[in-house]
Image (tube, grey):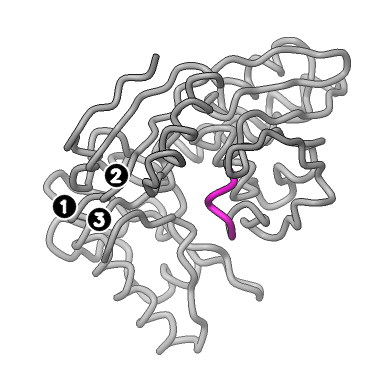
Amino acid sequence: MINIQKNILLSKYTTLGVGGPAKYLVIVNTTEELIEALDYARNKHLEFAIIGGGSNLLVSDKGFYGLAIINRSGSWRKEGSYIVADSGANLTKVAYDALEAGWTDLAFASGIPGSVGAAVVGNVGVPDSSISDVLVSTIVWDGGLIKEIVNSELNFGYRTSILKQNRDVVVISAKFKLSNGKMDDTLKIILEDKKRRAFSYVGRTAGSYFKNPKGDKSAGELIDSLGLKSYSIRGAEISQNHANVIRNMGEATAGDIYDLEKYVIEKVKDGYNITLEPEVVKLGKF
């Protein structure tokens, strides 16, 4: 039986550490509880939002007038030549556990923060690999129905999928293909990437803030070239370590971070005639 709470601050459920209260909040620990919470929202005609690791999320200071579902359904298992992971499972942990078992397909994801469900919805990845490369299918909740959607039906693109365009369809679990690889080379790549990300994401951040635009330069390179590293607006700062990371220096509000986001977009537009698009998802009114 799920426990619905009222007026709970969402700031402690995001890596940025900002955000107002949810009108209703429930923490689910299994896929069965996740489905129960979704059915509850549907039956009560409540808007809902799924929060996994909270690492790619900016919650409004005004909060969220609906049901926030904190998804901690974190198990995964091997089924034949596949890995099946709950949507609330930590992506990095699944990737590491799989690697220790000799399966290298998800190795690229070992340094990426967030949950499996968010990774599928946003098609997360690194420059040479994305979730869409290894995902076979996903089980989803769709308006009360449980169904399977295969990779080819998800319309994957750069940091997007059909699921990102339709938030009423929720990932319950994901199936990934398995294969063995060269462990020495793979581990070396993982360790290097882990060090790079740990250096870049020091402090309270949402990870990479903007999508990389088309062209030769990444979002971070564009922002850095304009001398914006360490630029701050009140409690929000562009990281000194990586220009595509916005950091909560300790007392930031969601409004501070949003104002800094708009400032960066304006400066890059003025300097390069390129409009950066946030990778970070917003919840609530801004």
Q: Position of residue 79 (x, y in %)?
A: 81, 14
Q: Residues within 10 Å of mark 2 (few under 14, many from 20)?
A: many
Q: In the figure, 12 relative to 28: above or below? A: below
Q: Nearer the viewer, residue 47 or 73?
A: 47
Q: Which residue is mark 3?
A: 60
Q: Nearer the viewer, residue 12 or 194?
A: 12
In this picture, which residue range is highlighted in magenta?
A: 165-169
- Residue 174 marker: none
Does residue 107 appear left or right of residue 62 in this picture?
right
Q: Position of residue 183 (x, y in %)?
A: 78, 19
First-in-chain label (2 vs 3): 2
- Residue 16 marker: 2
SS type, badge 1: loop
Quadrant of the image occupied by residue 68: top left
Quadrant of the image occupied by residue 185: top right
Q: Position of residue 175 (x, y in %)?
A: 75, 28
Q: Amino acid at mark 3?
A: Ser
Q: Which residue is mark 1?
A: 252
Q: Is residue 4 magenta?
A: no
Does residue 143 appear left or right of residue 49 in this picture?
right
Q: Amino acid at mark 2?
A: Leu
Q: CA distance from mark 2 to mark 3?
A: 12 Å
